[in-house]
Amino acid sequence: MNQPLPFAGIRVIEFAHFWSVPYGTMYLASQGADVIKVESVQRPDVWRANHTAPILGDRWMDRGLLWQATNLDKRDITLDASNDQGRALLKQLCEGADIFIENYASHVVEKQGLGYEDLKAINPGIIMVRAPSFGNEGPWKSYVGWGDVFEQVSGFATVTGYPDSRPQTPGGYMDPIVAMHLTTAIIAALEYRDRTGEGQLIEVPQSEVGMAMAGAILIADQFGYPPERPGNRAPGYAPQGVYRTGDAEKTYIALSIRDDQEWQSLIAMVGMPTLDAFAASGLKERHEHHDEIDAIILAWTLAHPANDLLSRLQSAGIPASRLLKPVDYNIEPQLVDREYYQELDHPLSGPRLFPTFPMHFSYEATRKVHSRPAPTLGQHNEEILRGELGVTEAKYADLIASNVIGTEPLQS
Amino acid sequence: MSTALEGIRVLEVGGTADFALPYAGLLLADLGADVILVEDSTGHPLRAGHPALPPDSAVHGAIFDFLNTGKHSVSVDYSLPSNADFAALVASAHIILTTLLPEEFAALDVNIPTDQAIAIVHVTPWGATGPYRDRPATSLIVQAAAGWVTSRKEVVMEPVQVGGQMHEWATGSYISVSALTAYRAAKQQHTPVTVDFSEFEAAHSMLCYDRLRYDARGELGVPRDRILISPFGIRRCVDGWVGINTLTQAQWEDACRMTGLEDYYGFMQEMNRGEGPLDEFSAKVDAFLADKTVNELVTLGQSMRVPTIPVTQGKEMFALAQWQERPFFYEVVGNQSTYQVPGPPWRLSVTPARQGTSVGKR
């Protein structure tokens, strides 16, 4: 018989929206936690509206693929937390929960009586997790932000781009990064609670996650190396760059030359006298002539298809890769071989390939990472409210009638 | 005061010139784990620097110290077969983070009892299986393979990597999650648990929705390529760079109102795709910003709920108003100078992260 998963028996109440927090809780759900996502018919998770529209059919807000990919393996209920009955039921859920996690603006949960002190009073062992943009205190506590903003304020935009370009926003990678940081803290807090029985409040400001990763940028600046935009170059390798190939469809490859031996291999492969002139160049000289060397390499790559170039470079042991494009994600050989994408069949939008995670645990050798597709809005209302919280049939009908619960957004 | 991971011993074994694994160890150390850097006689490769850093030993040393604050270092030639010192360390450990492949670790010939609750996380560029397993990798190559090298948000720009080794730091957080999950499973199952961790898959995990987005756009009947540009985006003003970010139509209209460009309310989608009157729009935005400071713009934008923010240049971060009031950066006294580093990215009310004023006492 299979062993229970590591977070089996852990109940997580997710009072959160968008990508960051729900991605972290989805990880816990994929490892056995019972994650109950709490939305409301008044305010469904806004992420549901991403890349979907009524044109896709009925219940279009259940069909968004990005929302689904962030909410696999969870159960979903609706509760209007601004209503006394809804709030009471949410608190009842928290009585039996291990983790309550939220990412609304700093005043929202307190206003609804769901602050840490409120929850601790009804469940001393609860771990409450908050993921504000800038922190729940300080002059920026009400400032608005999302992934791009956190990349800009933490210094990563300034070091992304070409020397003559403006700073470039990496592009919104912060959500899963924040999720993994807060999940690290959550598991640590569970360890502590296992030892002591004591819960606690965890705050993970999303901007501070970005800044925590900026240690090297900050130290280098203080030692006299202000941040620069290096394009695709790196001081320790040369040449290194991204080059267009001769394929009919616009295609690029990247390559890095790490040492003199790889440099000699590349010179022999390119076979152009103009490059031979740099045969004796060490790293320093190759950097000094990087623009000229790049022009010669580009002339070579433009004359050949990417497959041929990569085959030759990789055979010679030179680090090289095609630039992966979204259209190729599902057929990328390494990802396919390691079953990174997993098919799940959603009752409304049908079978799709969804991402898993980069960690492959020995106990999962014969198990699929995700166990079920994303829930529809309020799909588990009856199962949880009636079946687990003991709401009577009459009261349940009343909750529906008064829009405290429901399965359709009140407004599209 | 007790820490969250008190009593949990973590070994870092092996190592490459890559921030991911050491950052994972730092996160665990911040949470109170007893993290031991196991170095052989050649020393950790990051002591000699990272290929993306300026070739300056003072910088390398300070960054190495930062990544290893709160950890211990022991010198053990673990690659010698049946090394008793290494065997004793492994016997005392709960988590091992290693850059060795499973068979390389097995070749160290350390006997791990079948009932030892220990997590062994093998962190490699491509993972321990698959057709790319033995391919050489650099930071740029992992980014390229994972889909990180793009034209970012410009209409016309050759593809470019993300700077600052952002994917390595980010990967560290996936590694720390892997380690704690595997350790929890190992305790429950009273057996060693191994993790085959791929840095390439971690980088890919941070943008893997782009394929679903591509499919969705096709089904919605709009051009499949993802949103190309950010029409406001990062702009120069009097004293620096400011980011004006719009995600929703409401934010777009507010940003237009903020810059006096109400005439462009209806152009968001078109200009997001790099089409429409971009050049004249851009010139008007720049004209509006030309006599304003970053602080003025951030205050104005945020008062209108437009996500407006300073695009910080390195140590400018220390002076931001939010972190003047909310302590986050702290000073360390190194061998030759004093400098500031960022604190841990979390605040735990009962088990605060370890933080101090000098290297080794974080």
Image (cartoon, grey):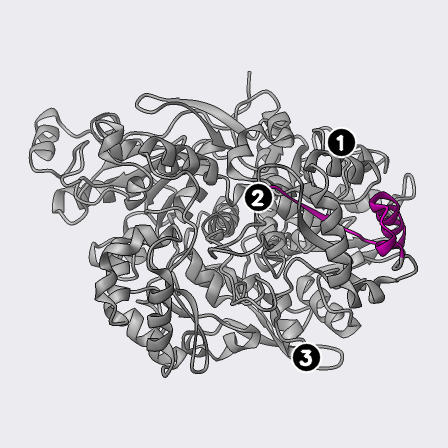
Between the C-alphas of marks 2 and 3, the distance is 32 Å
Checking the image for residue B113, the label placed there is 1
| Residue B229 falls left or right of residue A256 | left
Chain assignment, label 1? B
Q: Which residues are magenta?
A: A250-276
Chain assignment, label 3? A
Q: At 83% from the left edge and 42% from the top edge, which residue is drawn?
A: B87
Of residue B334 and residue A303, the one placed in the foreground of this image is A303
User: Is residue B298 in view?
Assistant: yes
Of residue A284 and residue B133, the one placed in the foreground of this image is A284
In which quadrant is the N terminus of chain B drawn?
A: bottom right
Question: Would you identify the image quadrant in which residue A240 lies?
Answer: bottom right
Of residue A281 and residue B211, the one placed in the foreground of this image is A281
Question: Would you identify the image quadrant in which residue B65 lies?
Answer: bottom right
Amino acid on which disc 2 is placed: Gly
Amino acid on which disc 1 is placed: Pro
Q: Residue under circle 2? A: B147
Q: Is residue A253 magenta?
A: yes
The answer to whether marks 1 and 2 sit on the same chain is yes
Question: Would you identify the image quadrant in which residue B119 lies?
Answer: top right
| Residue B11 falls left or right of residue B270 | right
In which quadrant is the C terminus of chain B drawn?
A: bottom right
Q: Secondary structure at mark 2?
A: loop
Question: Would you call the spot at circle 2 few (<14 residues within 10 Å), some (14-19), or many (20 or more)?
Answer: many
Q: Residue under circle 3? A: A224
Q: Secondary structure at mark 1?
A: loop
Task: Give coordinates of residue B184: x percent, y percent.
Answer: 57, 38
Q: Decide which of tag 1 and tag 2 comes sooner along the chain.
A: 1
